[in-house]
Amino acid sequence: MAHPILTIRHHSYAHLLANYLTSQGHPAVVQGPDKNGDATTADSKAYQVCLQDLNNIEEVKAICDAFLQQPNHPRYQQAAWQTGEQVTMPASSGRSAATLLHRAKQAPFTTVVLLLCSVSYALSLLGLFPELYYSLTMQPLSTLAANHQWWRLVGPVFLHFSALHFIFNLLWWSMLGAQIERTLGIFVLLLVFIVSAVASNIGQLLVSGPSFGGLSGVVYAVLGFVWWLGWLRPQWGLGLSNSIVGFMLVWLVLGYTDVLWVNMANTAHTVGLISGCALAAIMALGSRRHQHVA
């Protein structure tokens, strides 16, 4: 028996929510008029999202509340792709430039990092890579203690050595960083960025020396953060499909086998992933303790 939990006026949004609930372990279906909404009465145009059972209803309510606040969040479309169902969203009335600006305002820190990496890579294409590398690359900790150039603990994340390296990192950062920032705020993403950048850069320095660069350590950190919070606190609205997590973990393992055509900063990747998972666990545990105290 289907149990109605929410009424939505547009079929696309109703199907998005139903797909997302199903992907989070709460099987849901949509009941209402046909897909084209040809019914004539106002009431008949309402679509009901229905659960197959009412287990974990509080978690379901939290997911519905988050959806009503941000129905256009990428995680809902991602769930539709994961289930193999194509959901066509209503056309945006704004121009593409205005849409990009709106998204940038929703995730300003994600956008800043994206722009800094893009400017750095563009300058390297213009022949300025040696200067950038000299200014941003990591140095031994003893040297940093003497010259106090502490920005080098983060600096290597803005260096990329090829178009594939640059595109791969920036695509993942744009998707996962924005998801964190829009859901949990700029401070949380800033914390994940700084902790993972410093930890992964120091780890790579200690294992292989200072000749490395790239945002990959941070990318694996935001991956681990979203992955573990989606597992530990699904009601917070973060999450990744198992296929994406599996792909990134396989890519991580392949880096250690030396079968790829590129040299990878394997230690930075691993330390970044661990730091992201650890931060997610700490945040989830802290929220549980706060609830108990309250």
Image (cartoon, grey):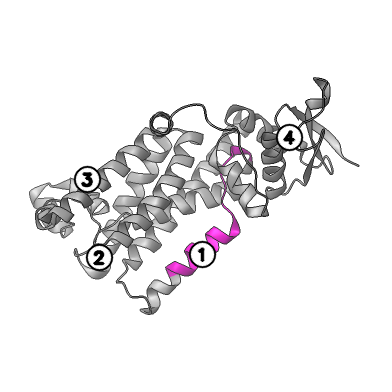
In front: label 3 or label 1 = 3
Give the mark nearest the N terminus, 3 or 1.
3
Quadrant including the C terminus: top right
Mark number displayed over residue 206: 2
Residue sitting at the far right = 1
The residue indicated by pointer 1 is: 247
In front: label 2 or label 1 = 1
Q: How far, Cα to Cα, is label 2 from label 1?
A: 27 Å
Kindly tell me whether residue 275 is visible in this rendering: no
Q: How far, Cα to Cα, is label 2 from label 4?
A: 46 Å
Three-letter code for the amino acid on which mark 2 is drawn: Leu
Give the mark nearest the N terminus, 3 or 4.
4
Q: Which residue is at a point 44% across and 49% down the rendered structure image?
A: 222
Mark number displayed over residue 119: 3
Magenta residues (range): 235-252
Q: Describe residue 233's horizontal placement relative to residue 5 as left or right.
A: left
Which secondary structure dominates the residues rendered in magenta? helix
Kindly tell me whether residue 278 is visible in this rendering: yes
Residue 5 placement (x, y as % from top left): 79, 32
